[in-house]
Image (spheres, coloured by chain):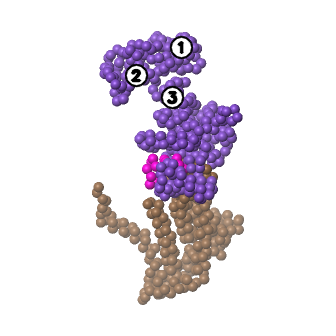
């Protein structure tokens, strides 16, 4: 674009989808996917993430709204005319074809010349490190190898956009982590835009440039993983992504981005105000367990409180403490099990503290 | 693990049932080699005279031609219509498609004589009685259930996401059918074709009703032969039909074995 801001590759504009005419599977969706980025759609099942992907692929049509790919309205364009690469859950390799024929499929149906197909298939096979397996049947390969074939098949015709629908769901944990890095490296090397669906938040954080969090048919927040984790804009995001201590209260005073919140037991905490807040607004104060500190470090914090240690779980690299404070018994603190970490015993009274910047007042 | 050892009684019973099923059909084989002029077992020696009569009789050879031609055309019609119907039902997979599939199996459930009577009334209107086309169409309909059943069984093992994958990777509906769906259900289609073929090959009742005076398929000529006289040529034809059907069924079985491996 002449003004220097590139047009996004994909635009959802006011998209709504209802399967039965009553409940909305997706509603009021406005989302841009930038050229070259790795965007993950994250959410629990039934949140609308898969419906969103399915509409982008063209298997379903939006009830309302429009979808643009590369500046062109594709809302009514049939699946096979969209030129989008796809990787499916459980791979969906064609059992009647060899690995080579599977990878050649998108080229065959596009009537690519034979010699060109052979060269491209060979290149795609070596890209996913499966050289020499072209004549095998998909059933003869391991799960990880089958998934690599599916990835090669989606990339072989050099699409601008590749959609991946929980592609690693069927693999065991170790293989899944390895495939996450492989996919990420492929993405970086080819510069292709990828839209990835998963319900696994760790996977989303590891791989994505940005993550779009969905719940009950609505897009809640789109942001890079770190921002999403450190600065959630809603209680749902704070609780869905990682763990949060949430303390219900009411805003007493607002000054700039900081506010003081009166909690249910009468204590006051200083928090970062999020969104449109005013004095008197009911909020939930969210604090990550690992942002809470103990002892001397706590004394320097804006928020500090005396708490009784109720339970200690030893997790190897970290300690997970459950404490009683603010009239509750479910305050969780995570401590890294660093050098010189002393033993803590239940019953001890400790000071816990945290900074106002690590604590967000989210409208409930 | 203990292997299942059938007891002597069970084994004997199994052989008895098998003989009951098979022997009456095979009884015609020695009869076809009789040296007498009536339906009986060979008395003094085995003779090929009735086989010679069969193969040199223009009527019988014409009947073989008619039966084959009708069976081939009606099988092609059944296979194309039945396969497309089964694929359509599989893709929709709704309550409606279940009902349609049920409807397709109806020709198998309705007594053939009822069906033949109905089709006779219709064919009188359409002027199709006594025509080859008429019999082909009727057999195509009665052969349909075999195809719909076997193809539906094949489709139930096919991952519906394969179709989505093919479309998502750029294949049109026709390319998806050609490269992905049909190759994966081919064994079912061939099984259905073989059953539809055998069905038309030895179908008598519909032909009796709508064959008129012009059409004498193999089963119909046998029927007339038995009614007129007890010519041993009938046994020869029966033997030939059994051998031919066995050949086709063996093809079906070996297909099934290939599918299983």
| Residues packed near mark 1 inside 10 Å, few (<14), some (14 to 19) or many (20 plus) | many
According to the image, label 1 marks what residue? A259
Q: Residue at x 44, y 54 (%)?
A: A140
Q: Which mark is residue A315?
A: none
- The kind of secondary structure element at disc 1 is strand
Q: Are marks 3 and 1 in contact (CB under 8 Å)?
A: no
Q: Count the marks: how many?
A: 3
Cα gap from disc 3 to disc 2, whole angstroms: 20 Å
Q: Is residue B145 left or right of residue B258?
A: right
Cα gap from disc 2 to disc 1, whole angstroms: 23 Å
According to the image, label 3 marks what residue? A226
Q: Residue at x 55, y 83 (%)?
A: B55
Q: Callout 1: residue from which chain?
A: A
- The kind of secondary structure element at disc 3 is helix
Q: Measured along the vertical axis of the image, is residue B53 above or below residue A101?
A: below
Disc with the residue nearer the chain's start (3 vs 1): 3
The answer to whether residue A130 of the structure is visible from this angle is yes
- Residue A188 vs residue A171, the one in the foreground: A188
Range of residues picked out in magenta = A138-153
Disc with the residue nearer the chain's start (3 vs 2): 3
- What is the drawing colour of chain A? purple
Q: Residue A149, position in %: x, y? A: 50, 50
């Amino acid at each position: 674009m002449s003004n220097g801001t590139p047009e996004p590759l994909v635009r959802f504009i006011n998209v709504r989808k209802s399967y039965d005419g009553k409940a909305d599977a997706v509603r009021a969706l406005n989302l841009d996917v930038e050229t070259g980025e790795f965007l993950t759609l994250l959410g629990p099942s039934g949140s609308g993430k898969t419906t969103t992907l399915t509409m982008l692929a063209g298997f379903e049509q939006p009830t309302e709204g429009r979808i643009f790919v590369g500046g062109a309205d594709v809302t009514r364009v049939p699946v096979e005319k969209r030129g989008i690469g796809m990787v499916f859950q459980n791979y969906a390799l064609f059992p009647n074809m060899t690995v080579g024929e599977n990878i050649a499929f998108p080229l065959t149906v596009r009537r690519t010349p034979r010699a060109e197909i052979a060269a491209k298939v060979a290149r795609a096979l070596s890209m996913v490190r499966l050289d020499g397996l072209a004549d095998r049947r998909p059933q003869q390969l391991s799960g990880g190898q089958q998934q690599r074939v599916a990835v090669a098949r989606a990339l072989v015709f050099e699409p601008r956009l590749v959609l991946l629908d929980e592609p690693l769901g069927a693999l065991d944990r170790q293989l899944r982590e390895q495939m996450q890095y492989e996919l990420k490296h492929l993405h970086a090397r080819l510069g292709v835009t990828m839209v990835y669906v998963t319900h696994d938040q760790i996977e989303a954080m590891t791989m994505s440039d940005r993550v779009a969090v969905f719940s009950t048919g609505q897009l809640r927040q789109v942001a890079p993983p770190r921002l999403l984790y450190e600065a959630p804009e809603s209680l749902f995001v704070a609780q869905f992504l990682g763990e949060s201590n949430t303390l219900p209260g009411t805003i007493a005073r607002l000054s700039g981005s900081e506010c003081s919140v009166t909690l249910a037991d009468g204590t006051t905490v200083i928090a970062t105000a999020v969104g449109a807040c005013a004095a008197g607004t009911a909020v939930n104060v969210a604090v990550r367990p690992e942002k809470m500190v103990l002892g001397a470090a706590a004394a320097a914090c804006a928020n500090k409180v005396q708490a009784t240690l109720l339970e200690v779980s030893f997790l190897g690299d970290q300690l997970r403490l459950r404490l009683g404070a603010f009239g509750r018994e479910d305050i969780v603190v995570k401590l890294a099990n660093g050098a010189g970490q002393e033993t803590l015993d239940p019953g001890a009274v400790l000071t816990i503290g945290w900074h106002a910047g690590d604590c967000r007042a989210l409208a409930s | 693990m203990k292997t299942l050892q059938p007891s002597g009684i069970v084994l004997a019973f199994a052989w008895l049932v098998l003989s009951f099923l098979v022997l009456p059909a095979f009884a015609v084989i020695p009869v076809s080699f009789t040296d007498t002029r009536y339906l009986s077992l060979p008395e003094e020696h085995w003779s090929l005279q009735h086989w010679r009569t069969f193969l040199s009789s223009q009527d019988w050879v014409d009947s073989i031609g008619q039966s084959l031609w009708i069976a081939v055309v009606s099988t092609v019609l059944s296979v194309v219509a039945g396969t497309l119907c089964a694929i359509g039902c599989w893709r929709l997979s709704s309550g409606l498609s279940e009902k349609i599939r049920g409807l397709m199996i109806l020709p198998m459930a309705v007594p053939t004589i009822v069906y033949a009577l109905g089709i006779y009334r219709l064919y009188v209107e359409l002027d199709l009685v006594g025509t080859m086309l008429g019999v082909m169409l009727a057999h195509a309909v009665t052969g349909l259930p075999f195809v719909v059943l076997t193809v539906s069984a094949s489709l139930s093992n096919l991952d519906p996401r394969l179709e989505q994958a093919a479309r998502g990777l750029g294949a049109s509906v026709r390319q998806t059918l050609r490269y992905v769906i049909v190759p994966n259900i081919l064994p079912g289609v061939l099984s259905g074709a073989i059953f539809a073929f055998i069905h038309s090959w030895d179908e008598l009742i519909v032909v009796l009703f709508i064959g008129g005076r012009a059409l004498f398929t193999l089963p119909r000529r046998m029927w007339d032969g038995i009614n007129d006289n007890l010519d041993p040529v009938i046994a020869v034809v029966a033997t030939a039909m059994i051998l031919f059907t066995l050949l086709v069924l063996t093809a079906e079985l070996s297909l099934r074995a290939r599918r299983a491996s």
